[in-house]
Structures are given as C-alpha cells and as structure tokens.
C-alpha cells in the first residue's frame, strides 16, 4: 500500500487541494478534509471561501490558471469536486466538466500528485443496471457526456487518478439543490411532477466527503473508476418526498403527480435505472449508508430525552 507516500501512516500533515469548495458537496468536504490535511480551496471567486481553507484563485476554463495554481500550491493530492450541473449552463458543460478536468489531470501528472475526481452515475444510459465499477460509459444527455469525457480525459492524462461515480447528494444540515427547488415550487403554489420509475442511489454528503478524503490519503493504490453511493435504491419520487418530509415542507399529497419517465418520449434523455454495484467500495470499507439508515440514525440522535419523574 502506498499511503506512506502521502505521510498518512507516519502522521505527517499533507496538503490537499480541493476544487468546488463553494458547492453543496464542498460545504462539508472542506471541513472534513481539514481534520486530516492542510486544505487549500480553489475557486474562480476565492473570496467566497473561508480563510481557514487558504483560498486561492483558479479558473477551470483556463489551462494556464490551473497549472499556475497547482505549481504554486504543490499539493500531495487533489479532490476535484467542481462541475457544472444540469440546468446551470449546458453550453459551458464541455469546457468545464471535460476540458477543465483534463487540464487539472495534466497538471496533477506534471506535479506528481494524486487526483480524485467526482463523477456521476449519469455517465450511464440507465438500460443495463446494475452497473459495475468499471462499466464503460454510455451517456444519453449533455451532462452525462461531459462527465464521461472528463473521466476518460483524466484517466488518460494521469495514471494516479480515480474517478468516483456517485449519485444524488443530500445532507441533513443543509437543503440539497433538488429539494430546495421542489420546496420553492410548492411555496409558490405550483404542482410537482416526480418520476416514479427513475431509480437512483442517493448519497449522504458527509459519507461521500469522508470517502473522498480516504481515497485521496489512504487508498492511494486505487485507480480507474469506482462507484460510491448510498446502498438504498430509491425512485426519484420516493426520495423527493422523504427529503421534503425531513425538512418539514408543508404540502398536500394531491399537488404531487407521479409519472413514468419511460413512457414519455420527450424525456428520452433521462436514464431510468442507474443502480450501481458497490462491491469495490464495500471491499475497501468506504461508507455507503442508505437514506433510510441515515434518517433513522439522525432521528435517534435527535430524539427528545425520556421524561423524568
């Protein structure tokens, strides 16, 4: 095992560069990584980051900016969590998710540092589940294509790379983007249309953040592609309503319509079944807590104490 190369076994504090620190995952990834390493967070607008994470400027669309930042920081490992998500700016997705990731991998290779890339289950078409860790990508939408291209570019550019294919990310200390959007629609008096046949494996962001740090510092022999999600396979409608209920969003059941995406030709770009095999993550002992277990643990920890006589 090559973990000693990063000083993990000897107790030395190493430097981890993290992209996407201002994102939903980054909000927990930065403090969790700080428990084990010196963390440098990079962003186009570093002022949005706490000084605790030594923020520095870097533009993923600018190769020279990436090389300058990495050569200056000289990290032992990079956790690449920055990306453009669906519905944000589809036209820029290839430049950020593909080309930017390639630049980052090339710079990591030149500096000889490990690269842990956050990818997605959306690299698959949803027709051949469950997908093994090394299943070849088969994207059917722009986002999935940009992430698949980013994976392939990074793995080709730098052999010390692992691409982590994950799913819907949620937290219990901050509303996720999907639930936030649903809650706003309900607050505005709109109906919700939810998919009852689209299957995903939501991942608790604390568990994902912990696993990413472990892959950066401990499991440094692991390369290629690796599936890392929660263990529960849930349809989008079930997951959405569980999150709405957790955040105590008031709504009438009648305002939610359940539909079958597979029966709507206009939704051909929506993968139906993205169940992933977690055999590799389980063998490594990485956390794969399912939604039901996470919510149950939270309820137990936050239960009121029994009345005293």
Image (cartoon, rainbow, N blue to C red):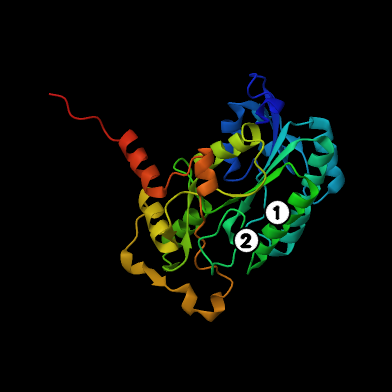
Question: Whole-percent x and y of residue 246?
Answer: 37, 48
Residue at the image position 44 percent from the left and 44 percent from the top? 289
* Res 302 visible: no
Which residue is more in the foreground, 251 or 58? 58
Query: Dot 2: what SS?
Result: helix
Residue furthest toward the left? 309
Question: Whole-percent x and y of residue 165?
Answer: 59, 52
Q: Are marks 2 and 1 in contact (CB under 8 Å)?
A: yes
Residue furthest toward the right? 64
**Quadrant location of residue 120?**
bottom right
Q: Is residue 284 left or right of residue 15?
A: left
Classify 260 as above or below 294: below
Q: Which residue is mark 1?
A: 151
Q: Earlier in the sequence, mark 2 or mark 1?
A: 2
Q: Which residue is mark 2?
A: 123
CA distance separating discs 2 and 1: 9 Å
* Res 242 visible: yes
Q: Is residue 166 left or right of residue 186?
A: right
């Amino acid at each position: 095992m090559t973990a000693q190369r990063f000083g993990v076994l000897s107790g030395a504090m190493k430097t981890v560069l993290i992209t996407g620190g201002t994102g939903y995952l980054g909000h927990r990834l930065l403090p969790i990584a700080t428990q084990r390493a010196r963390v440098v967070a990079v962003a186009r607008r570093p002022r949005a980051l706490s000084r605790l994470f030594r923020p520095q400027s870097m533009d993923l669309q600018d190769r020279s900016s990436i090389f300058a930042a990495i050569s200056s920081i000289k990290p032992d490992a990079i956790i690449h969590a920055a990306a453009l998500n669906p519905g944000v700016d589809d036209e820029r997705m290839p430049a950020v998710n593909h080309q930017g990731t390639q630049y980052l991998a090339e710079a990591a290779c030149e500096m000889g540092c490990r690269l842990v890339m956050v990818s997605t289950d959306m690299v698959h078409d949803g027709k051949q589940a469950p997908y093994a860790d090394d299943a070849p990508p088969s994207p059917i939408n722009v986002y999935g294509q940009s992430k698949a291209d980013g994976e392939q570019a990074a793995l080709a550019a730098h052999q010390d790379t692992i691409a982590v294919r994950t799913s819907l990310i949620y937290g219990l200390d901050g509303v996720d983007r999907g639930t936030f959007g649903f809650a706003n629609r309900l607050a505005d008096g709109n109906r919700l249309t939810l998919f009852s046949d689209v299957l995903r494996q939501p991942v608790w962001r604390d568990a994902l953040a912990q696993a990413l740090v472990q892959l950066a510092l401990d499991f440094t022999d692991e390369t290629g592609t690796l599936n890392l999600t929660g263990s529960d396979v849930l349809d989008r409608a079930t997951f959405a309503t569980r999150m709405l209920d957790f955040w105590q969003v008031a709504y009438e059941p009648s305002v939610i319509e359940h539909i079958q995406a597979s029966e709507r030709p206009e939704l051909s770009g929506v993968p139906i079944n993205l169940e992933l095999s977690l055999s590799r993550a389980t063998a490594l002992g990485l956390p794969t807590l399912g939604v039901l277990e996470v919510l149950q643990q939270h309820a137990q920890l936050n239960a009121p104490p029994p009345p005293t006589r």
